[in-house]
Amino acid sequence: MDRHTRLKRLRFRAWHRGTKEADLLIGGFFDAHSARWSDEEIAWFEALLEEQDVDIMAWAIGSIAVPPHWDGPMMTQMKNLGYVPFVE
């Protein structure tokens, strides 16, 4: 599958998680960072999407520790949360 198609599929999966909170966190992260990802980073994100949303969200907000195999620069970017719009 070519890069464009792969990213298009990932964007859909990132924005259709099942809850608005997960959509904003995971989809927002994708939109903010995916244009600069290497093939390895795309593969990391693809694998991350197989995890449960509650776990991804808990890792990102720091309520539970990030497992060692997910910890690294990509998770650090996700923890920044500056890409999630504030909604009143």
Image (tube, helix red, strand yellow):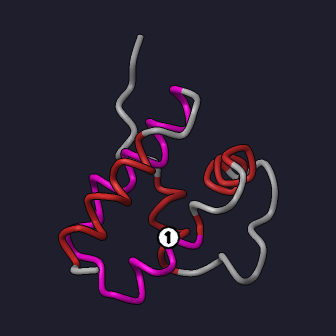
Decide which of 13, 77 is in the foreground and name it.
13
- Residue 17 placement, left or right of 52: left
The quadrant of the rendering that contains the C terminus is top left
The quadrant of the rendering that contains the N terminus is bottom left
Which residue sits at x=41%, y=41%? Answer: 15
Direction top: furthest residue: 88
Q: Position of residue 26 (x, y in %)?
A: 48, 49
Q: Position of residue 30 (x, y in %)?
A: 35, 56
Q: Which residues are the magenta region?
A: 20-47
Tell me the residue that label 1 is attached to: 46
- Residue 23 placement, left or right of 51: left
Which residue sits at x=40%, y=46%? Answer: 27
Which residue sits at x=49%, y=70%? Answer: 46
Specify few, some or many for label 1: CA neighbours under 10 Å numbering under 14, 14-19, or 20 or more.
Answer: some
Residue 79 falls in which quadrant of the image?
bottom right
- Residue 8 placement, left or right of 62: left
Decide which of 66, 17 is in the foreground and name it.
17
**SS at mark 1?**
helix
Q: Is residue 66 above or below residue 86?
A: below
> Is residue 28 shown in magenta?
yes
Q: Name the magenta segment's main secondary structure.
A: helix
> Is residue 5 shown in magenta?
no
Direction front: furthest residue: 1
Decide which of 5, 73 is in the foreground and name it.
5
Q: Position of residue 28 (x, y in %)?
A: 36, 45
Q: Position of residue 72 (x, y in %)?
A: 57, 81
- Residue kind at label 1, given as amino acid type: Glu
Which residue sits at x=45%, y=65%? Answer: 77
User: Count of labels shown?
Assistant: 1
